[in-house]
Image (spheres, rainbow, N blue to C red):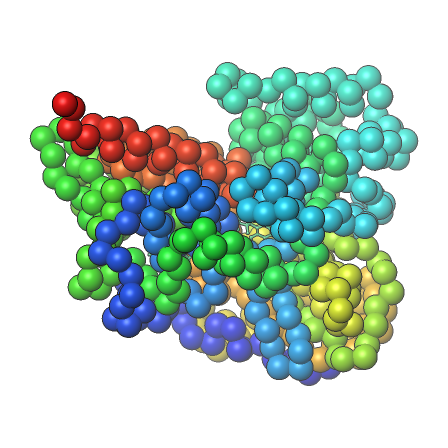
C-alpha cells in the first residue's frame, strides 16, 4: 500500500482574513454588476439553494465563494491515479429528493437513490438494517428485546414533539424515559444521528425527534453520480437562472447603512471593492458572520452576548482510501458504523484516539460508468485536540489515524490493504482551512444558534443567515431547506422594500 497523507492540508491552519484561500483578484469581479437584489456569501447547500430560488424568482443574485469548489462541505477532491473522494456524501433523508425536485430540478431529484445496506458492528450488536421505521422496529423488538408497544409509543412521542413547545428534555432523558438502562438501545438510536449532525445525549430531545423522524421515514439516501456531478448540475441550474457565480472571492465585511433606529444591509466588501445589494444572505459560519463581518455598533449588546455564547458543534476527521485501478471489493454494505467500545457514550465519539468510526464504501454504482472503488472513514472530532500540534506531531497523528483505520477496515474486508493505492487523512484543521468554519465545525452550531440565525434580519434589516445551525438546520437536507426558508423571507423583504419605494400618485 502506498500511503500519502500530507497532500490536502500540509499548510498549517490559518486564521487570517483570507483564511488561506486565494486572494480575490480584481478580474474575478471584473464583469459583475455594481448592484444586486441579493448577494449570497458562501456556496454551501444553504447558500446555493437560496441563490437558486431567488434567481428563479427573477431577482438579480451574486453568489461569492471563497474556495475554488462550489458546494461548501458538500464537496469532493481528486487524486492522481483516478481517485475521486466524496467528503460528506454518506447519506441523507429521503426529503432531499423533494427539496431538489422543487427547488433544483427533476434531473437532480431523479439521481437521489436509497443506499442498499447500513450495518452496525460493535460489542453490543452486529446487524444490518434498511434504516426504515419497520426495520428499526424489528431490530428493537426481535434483536434487542423491547416491547412492541413501547417502541410504537416512542415513535408516536417523537412525531408529536412540538418545536414551539420544547419541554427542555435532553436526548438522554428521552431514551431513559422509553428504554431505561438499555445502553445498547441508546447506541442504536443515537450513534448514526451523532455522525449525521454532531448531536449528543445532552442536546435537546426536540432536535433528535425531528432528525430521527426524517431519517426513519424511508431510510438513507445518496446521490448517484457523486458530489462532483451534483454540484456541476447545481452550477448549471444557477447559471440558467441568471445567478452570477464567482469563486476564489472571500467577502471581508458586510456593509451596513446606519439608521436612527436600526442599521440596514447595503452590500459587501471584498478587499477594497464594495458591491451594493438590497439584501445580503450569509452562508458563512453564524458566529463569524455576526462577530467578524459586521460593525458591532449595529447590534444590540444583548444580541451580541447571545451570539458570543452560542456553542459550535464538533468537527470531524476522515481517512480516504483509493483502490488501484482494476481492484474490486465485495459488497459489504454502503455505510458501516463500527466501534470496539464496550458501551455507548457521546463524548467518546469525538476522542482523538477513538474507538468508533463510520465507513462509507463507494462502489462503481456511486459513479455509473466508472469501475473504481473508494472507502472513506469518518469520526467526529474536537478541534482543540488538533489545533495546537506542531507540524511533526500533526503528521505523526495523521499517519497513526490512517494506520488504525486501515487495521479496522481489514477486519471488515480482509486483504484490502494490498489493493489500496492512495491513503490520506483530513482533520479539523483541514475542515477549518477549506470552509472557514470556526473550530472546523462540521455541523454549524448547537441548538442555541438557531434563534440568532433566524432573527438576524430583525436586528439588521436586509441581512439574513442560512447554513448549518441549531442541529436541526444542518446536514444536506437541513441546510438546503434552510436556504429555501430564508429565500422566501428575503423575497418578501425585497417586495415590501420595492412597494415602499414606489411613489403613490
Ligand atoms: C466529514 C463530514 C461528513 C458529513 N456527512 C454528511 C452526510 O453524510 N450527510 C449529510 O446530510 N450531511 C453531512 N455532513 C454535513 C453537511 O455536509 C453540512 O451540514 C452541509 O453541507 C453544510 O452546508 P451549509 O450550507 O451550512 O454550508 P457549508 O458547507 O458550511 O459552506 C459554507 C461555504 O461558505 C464559504 N464561505 C465562508 N466564509 C466565506 C466568506 N467570507 N466569503 C466567501 N465564502 C465564504 C465556505 O468556503 C463554504 O464553501 C457532513 C459534514 C462533514 C464535515
Depth order, front residue of 90/413: 90
Q: Is residue 483 above or below residue 84?
A: above
Q: Say whether residue 393 is visible.
A: no
Q: Residue furthest left?
A: 260
Which residue corresponds to the image point at 55% horizontal and 46% vertical from the top-left?
104
Residue at 63% of width from left, 17% of height from top?
160
Q: Is residue 496 above or below residue 198?
A: above
Residue 237: image x %, image y %?
A: 51, 54
Measured as percent of width and height from the top left, residue 220 is found at 72, 44
Q: Position of residue 59 (x, y in %)?
A: 36, 44
Q: Is residue 39 left or right of residue 487?
A: left
Residue 129 makes an appearance in the image: yes
137 on left or right of 393: right
Residue at horizontal 39 percent and vertical 64 percent from the top: 247
Is 409 placed left or right of 30 in the picture?
right
Classify 470 as above or below 175. below
User: 382 or 110: which is nearer to us?
Assistant: 110
| Count of marks, rendered view | 0
x, y (%) of residue 447?
47, 34
Q: Quadrant of the N terminus?
A: bottom right
Residue found at x 36% / y 35%: 491
Residue at the right extreme, as displayed: 142
Image quarter of the C terminus: top left
Dividing the picture into quadrants, the one containing residue 455 is: top left
Left/right placement of residue 262 relative to residue 49 reads: left
Q: Nearer the viewer, residue 291 or 277?
A: 277
Amino acid at each position: 500500500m502506498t500511503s500519502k497523507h500530507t497532500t490536502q492540508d500540509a499548510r498549517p491552519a490559518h486564521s487570517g482574513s483570507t483564511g488561506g484561500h486565494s486572494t480575490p483578484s480584481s478580474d474575478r469581479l471584473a464583469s459583475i454588476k455594481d448592484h444586486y437584489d441579493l448577494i449570497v456569501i458562501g456556496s454551501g447547500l444553504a447558500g446555493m439553494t437560496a441563490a437558486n430560488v431567488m434567481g428563479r424568482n427573477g431577482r438579480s443574485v451574486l453568489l461569492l465563494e471563497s474556495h475554488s469548489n462550489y458546494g461548501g462541505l458538500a464537496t469532493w477532491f481528486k487524486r492522481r491515479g483516478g481517485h475521486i473522494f466524496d467528503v460528506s456524501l454518506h447519506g441523507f433523508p429521503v426529503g432531499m429528493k423533494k427539496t431538489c425536485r422543487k427547488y433544483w430540478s427533476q434531473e437532480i431529484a431523479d439521481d437521489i437513490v436509497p443506499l442498499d445496506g447500513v450495518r452496525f458492528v460493535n460489542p453490543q450488536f452486529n446487524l444490518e438494517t434498511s434504516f426504515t421505521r419497520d426495520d428499526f422496529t424489528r431490530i428493537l423488538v426481535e434483536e434487542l428485546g423491547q416491547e412492541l408497544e413501547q417502541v410504537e409509543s416512542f415513535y408516536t412521542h417523537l412525531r408529536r414533539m412540538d418545536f414551539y413547545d420544547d419541554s427542555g428534555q435532553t436526548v438522554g432523558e428521552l431514551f431513559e424515559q422509553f428504554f431505561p438502562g438499555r445502553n445498547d438501545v441508546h447506541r442504536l438510536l443515537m450513534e448514526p444521528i451523532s455522525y449525521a449532525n454532531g448531536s449528543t445525549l445532552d442536546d435537546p430531545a426536540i432536535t433528535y425527534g425531528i432528525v430521527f423522524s426524517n431519517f426513519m421515514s424511508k431510510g438513507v439516501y445518496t446521490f448517484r453520480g457523486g458530489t462532483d456531478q451534483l454540484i456541476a448540475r447545481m452550477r448549471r441550474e444557477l447559471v440558467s437562472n441568471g445567478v452570477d457565480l464567482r469563486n476564489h472571492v472571500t467577502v471581508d465585511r458586510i456593509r451596513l447603512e446606519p439608521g436612527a433606529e436600526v442599521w440596514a444591509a447595503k452590500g459587501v466588501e471584498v478587499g477594497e471593492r464594495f458591491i451594493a445589494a438590497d439584501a445580503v444572505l450569509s452562508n458563512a459560519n453564524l458566529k463569524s458572520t455576526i462577530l467578524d463581518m459586521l460593525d458591532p455598533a449595529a447590534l444590540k449588546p444583548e444580541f451580541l452576548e447571545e451570539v458570543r455564547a452560542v456553542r459550535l458543534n464538533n468537527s470531524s476527521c476522515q481517512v480516504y482510501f483509493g483502490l488501484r485501478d482494476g481492484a474490486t471489493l465485495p459488497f459489504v454494505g454502503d455505510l458501516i458504523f463500527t466501534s470496539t467500545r464496550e458501551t455507548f457514550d457521546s463524548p467518546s465519539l469525538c476522542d482523538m484516539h477513538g474507538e468508533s468510526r463510520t465507513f462509507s464504501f463507494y462502489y462503481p454504482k456511486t459513479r455509473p460508468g466508472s469501475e473504481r472503488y473508494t472507502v472513506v472513514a469518518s469520526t467526529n472530532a474536537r478541534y482543540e485536540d488538533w489545533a495546537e500540534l506542531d507540524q511533526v506531531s500533526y503528521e505523526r497523528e495523521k499517519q497513526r489515524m490512517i494506520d488504525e483505520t486501515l487495521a479496522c477496515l481489514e477486519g471488515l474486508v480482509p486483504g484490502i490493504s494490498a489493493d489500496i493505492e492512495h491513503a490520506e487523512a483530513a482533520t479539523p484543521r483541514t475542515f477549518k482551512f477549506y470552509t472557514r468554519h470556526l473550530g472546523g465545525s462540521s455541523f454549524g452550531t448547537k441548538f442555541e444558534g438557531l434563534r440568532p440565525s433566524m432573527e438576524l434580519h430583525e436586528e439588521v434589516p436586509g441581512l439574513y443567515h442560512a447554513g448549518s445551525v441549531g442541529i436541526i438546520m444542518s446536514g444536506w437536507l437541513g441546510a438546503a431547506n434552510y436556504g429555501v426558508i430564508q429565500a422566501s423571507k428575503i423575497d418578501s423583504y425585497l417586495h415590501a422594500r420595492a412597494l415602499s419605494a414606489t411613489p403613490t400618485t
